[in-house]
Image (tube, rainbow, N blue to C red):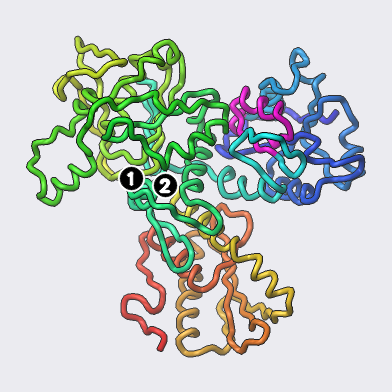
Amino acid sequence: MITAVGAAMDDNNTVRAVAIDYKAVLRGPGLAHEGIAELLRWLDERDVAWVLLTNDPMDAKSALAAAGLPEPALHLCRDDIPDKAKRGNGAWLEAVADRLSLRTNQLILVGTSQFDWYTGIHAGVVHIHARWASRLGKPITSLISDEPADVIELLEHFLLHEPRWAFRLDDEDRAFEIRSMLPFNAQFPRGGGRTFTVKDIFTYDKTVKVGDQDARDVLMLHLLCAAYLDGTLPGQSFFCVYPSSTPAKGSPQLAGFLQRAKVMTGSSYKEDLLERVAQAPDTSLERYRRSTGQSTGTLDISIAAQARTVRVNPIFKKKIAGRTVIVFDDFTTEGKSVEWARILLSEAGAARVIALTIGKYPSGHTAYQLRTGISIDPFSTNDITAADFLTTPGAKGVDQGPSLALAATMAHFVTAAQEASAETAASDGALRRPIPAGSRWPMSSYLDMRQKHLAEMLTDIHPAYALTWRAEEFVPEGEDRVTALWWITLPGQAAEQWYDTAEAERLLATICKVAGVIWYPAGERGEASPA
């Protein structure tokens, strides 16, 4: 048995340990699964502990050494769990957290069975199914890894970054928390010289691909992982979506993902928990019309319009008491929708309400409270007016949130889709000629100017943003044209990623925009263009 040395509680808001079922590590005596050694080494290099879980006692150190693997920070078997609880009981992961002086939301579990899934659910810990070791007959989780490298990708891009928010509110007196991930106009690369905004997906219902990934899924996974890390995705909660202005119509972009992602921490998605029972004004559209002088100003877009049209579904009357309810919405502006959701759910008996939104407009969030003597029925619509609420305006403005990290993630998925062909070209005899940053091989005058312009800004921005880069140029087999690759490592990124010149320019332009630096790639805003 390997035991951990007691230590002070780790206060990082990132994953600090990965618990792995032994069947995902060893495929037989002295035989490790392909890629598992690289995963364990990668974890060690980032000071992330790994924990071995076995049902029966075993000499883990010897068994792992025989397979050429390092010993874990901790090995637990059933004898080490309080009351010798069987696998499936959250006590397994609670014991891991206790031994390593961690919170349970600093753990993830890599499992191979349905019982491992239950273990994660009952502890409120994100579970990843190791399909490289076990292919179950039915899907049990939204997070599945085909190989250990997939676990690395999930950790690197979603779970080893401290959560950052464009807007956050923690209101202990009202048992209410809000997290908004991005500014409403956040923009990201999608490959092929194109970009997209969060509004393209969540307002205009566009399907956007970044490499082989759905951009909606990448954004939603980032939102949920960040909430998990900062404690606003507690296990066994109720998930719901704030309804659109039209009765019986929700947000397909949110609902489609949540229907699968609910099991990340064992929560339940209640599609009809909040109901729009009558048509309400489209507040976003009405605000736009007023800003452009196209509105008469007669439509009521106050919180009272929400009170008259949205209720808690009566079928949940006996199910909400004492629950944590997480309300998802695409965007929030002044907070009328999420504030009305809080009032309704609190009146219905919820112990805690959390609002998670993709975007936030720069208007200040206003806190709403019913005036003394005003009562509502949360399971019905309520004919009250804006005067029945006490309001507390908040400061205006939003931060950039994880815009830079998410831009890097999107660029990663775009370039990952190209890596196989690039590696194939290299193996077919392409001549690669590494060059130090700043030096050049002969090129056409335009290409030389364009790449020099890019290299200079990468060099200039490096000291302030801890960005590292190197360039590599090669001549593909059978061609006389020089092609450039840019290897860039962003802050918080564990490994460098490669980009072609156009992708590197778009990434750098995004970084500069977030940093408030004025920079355009060559060929834009009047610079010389290729003939």
Q: Quadrant of the N terminus?
A: top right
Q: Please give left or right for residue 508 compared with residue 167 in the image.
A: right
The kind of secondary structure element at disc 1 is loop
- Which of the labelled discs sits on residue 361, or is there none? none
Residue shown at 63% from the left, 50% from the top: 153
Look at mark 1 in the image and give the residue it sits on.
398
Residue shown at 28% from the left, 45% from the top: 362
Is residue 478 positioned above or below 339 on the image?
Answer: below
Q: Position of residue 274 (x, y in %)?
A: 35, 25
Q: Which residues are magenta?
A: 103-129
- Which of the labelled discs sits on residue 401, or is there none? 2
Total numbered badges shown on the rendered structure: 2
Q: Quadrant of the C terminus?
A: bottom left
Question: Is any atom of residue 466 visible in this view?
Answer: no
Mark 1 in CB contact with mark 2 (< 8 angstroms): yes
Camera-side residue: 218 or 408?
218
Is residue 437 positioned above or below 127 on the image?
Answer: below
